[in-house]
Structures are given as C-alpha cells and as structure tokens.
C-alpha cells in the first residue's frame, strides 16, 4: 500500500463517458476529480466494446463513434486536469472521522475526498480467466491478464493466448523488447483489426514471433514462477514451450466487484438513488449512469450526462457548505469561463 494519501474533491469510480462528463460538470463548479477504472484507458464500454460503432442519440451529434465521443469528452474536461488511476479497481472504502471517504485501490493507492461518485456503468470489466490446471498458483507472479509496465517483459520469454485485438496488439508492442514471443490460439482465424492481423502474420513469416494453433493444457514451474507451458496442438501433438510470463487475453466479463460490498442499497446489481440529487442511501456517495436505478430510469448515455450535472450541483453544497457555488450559463458566467480558460 502507498504511504501517500491523495486528497481531492471528488473520487469517481468508472471512467466511461458519464464519469468523464462528471469531471467537466464538477470542474465548472471548481471541484477537482480523480477517477479509478480497471481498464488501461478511459472510455469504458465506448472504447472497449464499440469504439467504431456509430451512436446516433447524442444531442448535437447526428452521428459519432464510441471512440470519437470519448476523445471529445476527454478534450472537453481537459481544462480541469482530471487524474486517472487505471488498471485497478476501487476496493476498500471507509468513512474517516473528518467525514471524508478514504478509498484504497487494488494496486494499493489511497485516495481521500468528501464526495464519492459511482459511475461504473454495468460494472467493472474483469478478465475472463482460462481453466488451466493450477492457474491460481501462478497468478500475480508469472500470469498477467493485462500489461501494466512493458519493461517488466524485457528479455523474457512470453506466451500470449488469444485471437482478438488485445492479444495481437500486445504481441506487436512487446515483440521488440521480449526475448521470445509465442502466441497460442485455438484456430487460424482472428478477431482483430485487419492491419493488426497483417502485421502479426508478417512477424510470424519473418520468424520473429511463433504461432501455435492449440490449447494450453499444463503450467509447469516452481513457487509460482513459470518455466514452461504444455500445449496440445490442433493436430493432437503435445509440446512444451519455455515461458517466463503467460499473458491470457481471453476477453472480458462484467462484474460489480468490490462496490457490492460497500453497503449501498442494491437492486439487482444496480444502486438505488434519490433522483433529486442522485445520492445513494449513504451520505456523500452518489451514483450516476447505467449503474444507478430509479423508477423512471432510461439507460442512455445522454441521461447519464443529465444525472452527472444534477449530482454535481447537489454534491457541492453537501461537501462544501461554506463555499459559494458558481452557477449559471457557460455563455455568460465569467467565473465559469475563467475555469474553462476561454
């Protein structure tokens, strides 16, 4: 755990479109935000599930892709310098004697703020784990489900598993620094961008990457450190491949994760809120976007934007009763324009 406590005004759990827009609404009021997300980049479902899929119901945007929307939201909130804590989950939450909340992430980072906002969408994206024998022995030691620091794999022998964009992208990124890379996939076809697939096949043709069609059947090593993996090929042969690190990229599933343990009033994995403030039943904790529920709830990005605006205006006087809140229109309020830098 980190010894340093990061203090801010608002901790936002979830860096999807609604969480990012909450940064903008909070920033207009003079509030600073830190966001936590277990993906490796902001964007949530927009970036992870449909970056190139067109969206037609964003006000003022007749047509915009998921990634374009995230890019624009990131640009819009950039004057407020949000801080992102990626590749980690919001884990433990406790109330301090000061009335503030202290949150610890799965990587041991500690944040403190008077306001916590759950904007986790349908939940956290967590990796689908393969059913390899004794997998848990090697997890967190020599089996990684995501790449946090590329330098970790310098001059190492790597086995990657999967046939989607993540697997092939990381083969391309890690190949220049790894000692050897082997990709294992159960079939010849891939589910990746054509350009990425073409680059991968060229590396295989050049002898810079090994490709084995088959399935991993055994993990072999000592004290959690892999030495090799046993692979059954599609032809029925069994081979051992030297391996310092195994990186399975088998896709993602959605889980509410540690949020379910925070004592919030849940209704079928959704957080019930007061629609006048989007507060939960615990003072200082709010919920917006797809994760929250109320009788007239419509699950759309645009309703999440509305919820973010109402929430920020309600949370400000709760957390800072002695501070004056700058309200009004961005077209005329000079204080807001100063914050935007326009």
Image (cartoon, rainbow, N blue to C red):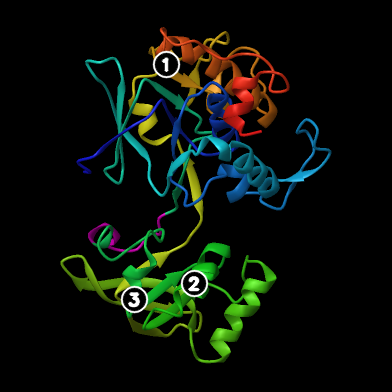
Residue 184, compared with residue 206, is above or below; it is above
For the stretch drawn in magenta, the main secondary structure is loop
At 66% across and 31% down in the image, what residue appears? 301
- Residue at (44% x, 53% y) in the render: 128
Q: Say which label, 2 or 1, has the lower sequence index.
A: 2
Earlier along the polypeptide chain: callout 2 or callout 3?
Answer: 3
Tell whether position 284 is magenta.
Answer: no
Residue 154: numbered disc:
3
Helix, strand or loop at label 2? It is helix
Residue 257 visible? The answer is: yes
Q: Position of residue 204 (x, y in %)?
A: 54, 86
- Quarter of the image with the C terminus is top right
Q: CA distance from mark 1 to mark 3?
A: 46 Å
Q: Which residue is mark 1?
A: 265
Specify whether 173 is left or right of 297.
left
Horizontal and vertical percent position of residue 298: 67, 22
| Quarter of the rendering occupied by the N terminus | top left
Q: Nearer the viewer, mark 1 or mark 3?
A: 3
Residue 39 vertical placement versus 122 (above, below)? below
Q: What is the crowding at mark 2: few (fewer than 14 residues within 10 Å), some, or many (at least 20)?
A: few
The residue beneath circle 2 is 173
In the image shown, does 231 or 170 lie closer to the viewer? 170
**In terms of sequence position, does the residue under pointer 1 or pointer 3 come before the other?**
3
Residue range (magenta) = 129-137
Residue at the far left in the pictured view? 223
**Label 3: few (<14), some or many (≥20) within 10 Å?**
some
């Amino acid at each position: 755990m980190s010894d340093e406590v990061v203090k801010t005004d608002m901790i936002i759990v979830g860096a999807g479109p609604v969480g990012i827009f909450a940064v903008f609404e909070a920033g207009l009021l003079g509030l600073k935000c830190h966001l936590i997300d277990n993906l490796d980049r902001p964007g949530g479902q927009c970036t992870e599930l449909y970056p190139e899929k067109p969206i037609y119901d964003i006000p003022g945007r007749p047509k915009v892709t998921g990634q374009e929307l995230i890019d624009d939201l990131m640009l819009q909130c950039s004057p407020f310098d949000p801080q992102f804590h990626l590749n980690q989950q919001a884990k433990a939450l406790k109330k301090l004697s000061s009335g503030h909340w202290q949150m610890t992430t799965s990587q041991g980072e500690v944040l403190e703020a008077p306001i916590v906002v759950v904007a986790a969408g349908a939940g956290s994206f967590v990796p689908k784990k393969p059913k390899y024998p004794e997998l848990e022995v090697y997890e967190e030691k020599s089996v990684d489900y995501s790449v946090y620091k590329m330098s970790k794999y310098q001059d190492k022998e790597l086995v990657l598993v999967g046939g989607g964009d993540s697997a092939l992208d990381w083969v391309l990124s890690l190949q220049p620094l790894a000692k050897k890379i082997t990709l294992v996939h159960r079939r010849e076809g891939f589910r990746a961008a054509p350009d990425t697939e073409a680059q991968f096949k060229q590396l295989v043709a050049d002898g810079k990457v090994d490709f084995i069609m088959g399935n991993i059947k055994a993990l072999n090593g000592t004290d959690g450190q892999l030495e090799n993996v046993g692979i059954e090929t599609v032809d029925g042969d069994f081979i051992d491949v030297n391996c310092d690190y195994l990186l399975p990229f088998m896709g993602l599933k959605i889980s509410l994760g540690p949020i379910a343990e925070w004592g919030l009033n849940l209704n079928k994995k959704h957080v019930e809120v007061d629609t006048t403030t989007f507060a939960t039943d615990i003072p200082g904790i709010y919920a917006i976007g797809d994760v929250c529920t109320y009788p007239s709830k419509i699950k759309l990005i645009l309703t999440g934007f509305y919820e973010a605006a109402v929430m920020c205006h309600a949370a400000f006087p709760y957390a800072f009763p002695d501070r004056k809140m700058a309200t009004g229109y961005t077209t005329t309020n000079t204080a807001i324009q100063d914050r935007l830098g326009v």
